[in-house]
Amino acid sequence: MAIRVSRTPFVGGNWKMNLTRAGAAELARSTAAAAAGRRVECVVFPPFVYLPDTIAARTADMCVGAQDCSAETQGAFTGQVSAAMLRDIGCCATLIGHSERRHGLGETDALLTKKIARALEAGLTPVLCVGETLAERDAGRAHAVIETQLRGSLAGHSEDALATLVVAYEPVWAIGTGRTATPDDAAEAHRTVRKTLASMYSVRFSEQARVIYGGSVNAKNAADLFAREEIDGGLVGGASLNATDFAAIIAAASSRRT
Ligand code: 13P
């Protein structure tokens, strides 16, 4: 029997490698204002170098996450940033395994499971990204890919340790393409995520974890996506760079009935 739980909507703004220092600070302030009083957990993910300026604008309604963290704790890892450092400067979360890192930089599930460990040790909320490529979808393998990525990336972590886990389903073919998964397709993929979590852990865990959708979410399509019981919010790229559009997305998530 399904356990009914209330999941606070989660909206992430992944700024990727965009903005200037002044632009990041300004967008952080407008986003915090848009999140004020909304029933939503709002997290923005600026480029590393703009984290301090963005953190300066954080409020009780908006916190700041990193786009990645190292799989290591400290030492001779040139160019990397540890989860503990991110926590130290005031981050609340980190993306893990974004497709632009899985596919662009060759990150594997074995690496991602270590990154999740470091994030959890540091007290950061891990936002684990999973999703199939177009070729995988066309080959009918979308659900198998999602399951494999979840099993691989979460390997070795207990249900208790993963209490804060957020899973972002981001089909690679929908990212930055303007081509959004239909609410039906997204909801089906989210059911696969929950089925996998239930089989790895428990039904209770699978019902409590937030599963959000990413891939060309915009001010127009957000409400339809978030109307689905399965979709607890969104991870937004391009539209999160526009304060007005992102405010509309936050409002759509906040008025979602759970
Ligand atoms: P877009 O919203 O630009 O498609 O990006 C989605 C994404 O990758 C969020 O992490």
Image (spheres, rainbow, N blue to C red):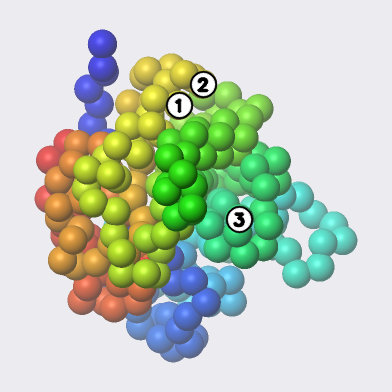
Q: How many marks?
A: 3
Q: Amino acid at mark 2?
A: Met
Circles 1 and 2, Cβ within 8 Å, touching? The answer is yes
Gap between marks 1 and 2, in whole Å?
Answer: 6 Å
Name the image quarter holding the N terminus: top left
Q: Amino acid at mark 3?
A: Arg
- In the picture, measured across the screen, residue 170 lies left or right of residue 231, that is right
Q: Residues within 10 Å of mark 3 (few under 14, many from 20)?
A: some
- Callout 2: SS: helix
Query: What x and y, as percent, mark residue 88?
Result: 61, 58
Q: Amino acid at mark 1?
A: Thr
Q: Nearer the viewer, residue 159 or 136?
A: 136
- In the picture, measured across the screen, residue 206 lies left or right of residue 229, that is right
* Location of mark 1 (residue): 196
For residue 5, what is the image quadrant? top left
* Location of mark 3 (residue): 102
Q: Where 207 falls versus 72 (above or below)?
A: above
On residue 200, the disc is 2
Q: Nearer the viewer, residue 61 or 68?
A: 68
Q: Earlier in the sequence, mark 1 or mark 3?
A: 3
Gap between marks 1 and 3, in whole Å?
Answer: 20 Å
Query: What x and y, as percent, mark residue 74?
Result: 79, 54
Q: Where 172 falls versus 28 (above or below)?
A: above
Q: Nearer the viewer, residue 221 or 121?
A: 221
- Residue 63 visible within the image: no
Q: Is mark 3 within 8 Å of ligand 1?
A: no
Query: What x and y, as percent, mark residue 86?
Result: 60, 59
